[in-house]
Image (cartoon, helix red, strand yellow):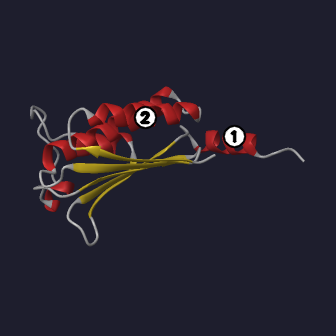
Amino acid sequence: MEVVLEMTLPRSAESAPLVRRTLDASLRGLGVTSEIRADIALAVGEACANVVQHAAAGREYEVRARMDGYRCIVEVVDEGGAADPAQWGGAPTPPLAESGRGLQLMRAFTEDVRISDRIHRDGAVVHFEKSLYGTVGEAVEGAAEEVPAS
């Protein structure tokens, strides 16, 4: 089964919890463990917080998520902001800093984190993926359960 979510949200702090709850409910419906759901919730919450804090040029942003039972692929798309793309791959945030750890957290808890400029429009796309299984063996077992008996 594939689940696709697309949300257009106001650039406000109140939108991030809605995104986390909606995505979590979909993942729970697919039988994803609470640990993996928590990793995804953390990453999407950080990506949304970045939009709310830094994408000053836009009034809205989009969240797109696709879950196919094996992977969850999320993109958070904003309409522009003041962030310098050179900072996206920058040095780690100092341990006592009060902010600036969002990207580090996304990289620590998810896979294939990428940030890119939007094509033909202002803004950025934060992309990350997460395997919905803890190990390759679990993914194979899960796939075997979905194969109909002949």
Task: Spot the residue most to the right.
Answer: 150
Residue appearing at x 12%, y 59% in the figure: 84
The disc placed on residue 22 is 2
| Foreground label between 2 and 1 | 2
Residue appearing at x 18%, y 43% in the figure: 52
Residue appearing at x 21%, y 60% in the figure: 123
Q: Would residue 120 be seen by someone viewing this image from the given angle? A: yes
Residue 95 location (% of width, % of height): 13, 34
The disc placed on residue 89 is none
Determine whether label 2 and label 1 are within 8 Å by CB: no
Residue picked out by circle 1: 141
Element carrying mark 2: helix
Residue 8 location (% of width, % of height): 33, 48
Q: Residues within 10 Å of mark 1 (few under 14, many from 20)?
A: few
Amino acid type, residue under disc 1 in the picture: Glu
Element carrying mark 1: helix
Dot 2 or dot 1, earlier in sequence: 2
Residue 143 location (% of width, % of height): 69, 45
Alpha carbon separation for disc pair 2 and 1? 27 Å
Amino acid type, residue under disc 2 in the picture: Thr
